[in-house]
Amino acid sequence: MGKVVPLGGNYAVAYAVKACDVDVMTAYPISPQTTIVERLSEFVANGELDAEFLHVESEHTALSVAIGAAAVGARAYSATCSQGLALMNELLYIMSAMRLPMVLTIVNRALSAPINIWNDHSDFMSVQDAGWVMMMSASNQEAYDEVIIGYRIAEDPRVLLPVITSMDGYIQSHVVEPVEVESDEDVLSFAPKRRTWYVLDPDKPVAMGSVGDPNYYYEFKRQQWEAMKEARQVFDEVVVDFAKKFGRRYSAIETYMLDDAEVAIVGMGSFMGTIKAYVDRARKEGIKVGALRVKLYRPFPADDVAKALSNVKLVGVMDRALVPGSPTGGHLHSDVIAAIKQRGLDVRTIGFIAGLGGRLLTMDNVKQMVSALIKYKDARELPKEPIFIGVRE
Amino acid sequence: MSKPITVWDLPRDELLAPGHRMCQGCGAAIAFRHILKAAGKDTIVVMPTCCGEITSTVYPDNAWRVPWIHVAFENAAAVASGIRAGIEVLKRKGVIPKDRQINVVAIGGDGGTFDIGLQALSGTLERGDDVLYICYDNEAYMNTGIQRSGSTPMGAWTTTTPVGKIWRGEWRPKKRKDLVAIAIAHNVPYAATANPAFPLDLYAKVKKALSIRGPKLIHVLSPCVPGWRIEPDKSVAVGKLAVLTGMWINYEYENGVYRVTTPVPKRKPVREYLRLQGRFRHLSEEEIKKIQQLVDAEVERINKLIGKEVIGPVEG
Ligand SMILES: Cc1ncc(C[n+]2csc(CCOP(=O)(O)OP(=O)(O)O)c2C)c(N)n1
Ligand code: SF4
Ligand SMILES: [Mg+2]
């Protein structure tokens, strides 16, 4: 049994990083991630954690340092969001393709412009193609647990991919919740340091990051696809182990009142709490609505999502990032449609955009979504554009 | 003073394998070879994207007989810092034996150093990370086909500073930014210039740099056959002439003290250096005179730093 401590999401994550005995930490301040770095600095400053803490001059360097550290076999950690994540972008792709493990926490925040420090998912979603395993939490406990689970997945020899864990900026990062903090020993026995990958070692010289010409590049990429498939398998194993060890059970998706639901809302992150609360209220009024939260975003749990939604008449997918000009307007919506259609299911969807740049989601907003779902449930024609919730037109 | 080294003192080990695909006569290849002789096998090399990188490690081939890593174009110094940090902490935690000496050497081009990589380099130097950073300077972006860099000398033709009706090659009307001075401004313990035409000097500097803890920088001139439009058998001659004309000065800085390692009592006119290279072929007498003036001023500056005339006047 761990100790229950009231913690904001950022501090919770810092405790998890400390417990994982991270070797090299490097991060650059950016709201709302900054207090992770501050707390980690304190751990190192007080001798509570023996790690190299590099004060870098940018996020680009933060990730470069992590790559270098991982390349010699160190357990590396960093945290960022928004513009910082955008600045890392180039290296995200490189690190996953070099098959070097680490954990990077994103404290989800809007992307400029206009510059905005508040929460949405435009930063997280913008790196969906980068080849990282990606999880999004919905509570501070989950944010804490994701780091520990993250190292287990990243360093599993079947996977060897870097892992992104995430939480919603301010809504989680700066709001205190009770978090069960496990002992360092328990955490490390769950996620032991195994150095399962090739490292730079003068006794066994290897070259990393070679040129992959047309004769080889493709095969490297093909292997990344396989590694992601393995990651899904490993995720499922690790969450079972985790539940055994710590008593908290996670899965790639979380469903709520879906069994008999006619309509459902699919989304990610902390807003799903509000949605579940509204589902409770609507159920009392006899509306058959359910909810589905995607926790594991890459690899996308397509089978789970499709199966869970297979009996729903109309699904509303809520995206918290906008992709101007795309067919659906949102990443998650496109993924959900793909999952459903690839499995030949006749489940229809509409898209919602909500909560951009820290716009809060009210119960009224959710009501609006559910009303739209009911309105279109049996309609022949569905909207071809996302429905913008909570915006002034 | 220790006894000066001779070629007989150089290790026979060739840690840069033949068949590396660099051009015949590549100055950088000569530099890499001697850098590795000095650093030895307990060395991890970091390279940014550059000519040396793409030629030497085309999968599955690899010319480096030491552990080697390339990540991106602008971050060699940062990757090197991460490697050093990883080694240090893994030593403390007993994963790597505590007494294991491992050199971390980043070797980047001028583009990856003067331009896109300067910020990361500044971070590494400023933090004091125990890394040797070597810039091999072929004075343009060779990998992408000879484009101008922040190190391209005045008047030089490149594909982005072509010679046309209005442009006359590189336009910067002054000496390029001073990389060694930039390093020294970060309070590094050691910084130097070197040149593969003087391999013993280069070797000694790498050795010395690696004996010092902290961030070190060596700026190495690297004649480039296609980029400078020289004959493959002329790269060493051109490198020598760079020093004999004062276009390049081999010196070092160690804890506040400057020392010219290749004194030149009587300089040759810069024309002799320029005329061997196609990239300067278009220069007029007037333009050559301007370059001569820039060199004269730099020689004067270095002589002042040293406190005596180590580089002499142009021979009459
Ligand atoms: C971010 C980024 N921008 C541009 C490039 C393209 N690029 C690769 S190497 C290079 C020039 C390298 O020049 P330099 O550092 O001088 O090395 P050289 O090839 O001359 O030895 C450029 C522009 C890149 N790989 N990455
Ligand atoms: S282009 Fe220049 S720097 Fe590149 S390999 Fe050839 S000679 Fe060397
Ligand atoms: Mg160059």
Image (cartoon, coloured by chain):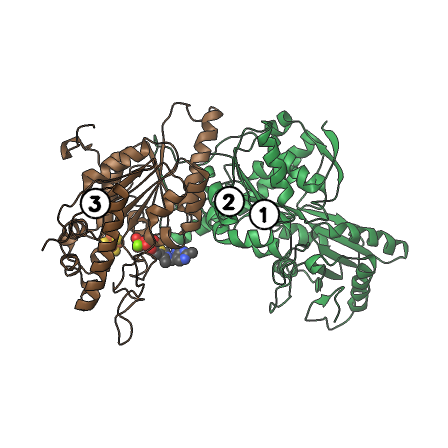
Chain colours: A green, B brown
Q: Are marks 2 and 3 on the same chain?
A: no
Which residue type carries mark 3? Answer: Pro
Q: Residue furthest bottom?
A: B165
Number of numbered labels in the structure image: 3
Q: Chain of mark 3?
A: B
Query: Where on the picture, by quarter, is residue B125?
Result: top left
Label 3 SS: loop
* Badge 1 vs badge 2, beta-carbon distance below 8 Å: yes
- Label 1 resides on the chain identified as A
The vertical placement of A299 against A71, above or below, is below
Residue A281: x and y in percent read: 87, 54
Q: Give the number of the mark in front: 1 or 3.
A: 3
For the C terminus of chain B, the quadrant is: bottom left
Q: What amino acid type should be assigned to the residue bearing mark 1?
A: Thr
Q: Measuring 82% from the left and 54% from the top, which residue is drawn there?
A: A279
State the image coordinates of residue B115 (x, y, percent, origin top left). 38, 55
Q: Would you name the residue on which mark 2 appears?
A: A62
Residue A128, how many percent across, how many down? 57, 54
The span from disc 2 to disc 3 (Cα, nearest Å) is 33 Å
Gap between marks 1 and 2 measured at Cα: 9 Å
Mark 3 neighbour density, 10 Å: few (under 14) some (14–19) many (20 or more): many
| Horizontal arrangement in the rendering, residue A265 relative to residue A209 (left or right) | right
The front one of A272 and A59 is: A59
Residue A153 appears in the figure: yes
Distance from label 1 to label 3 (Cα)? 42 Å
| Residue bearing mark 3 | B196
Residue in the foreground of this view, choosing between B61 and A251: B61
Residue under label 1:
A80
Marks 1 and 3 close (CB-CB < 8 Å)? no
The residue closer to the viewer here, A341 or B101, is B101
Where A212 sits versus B204, above or below? below
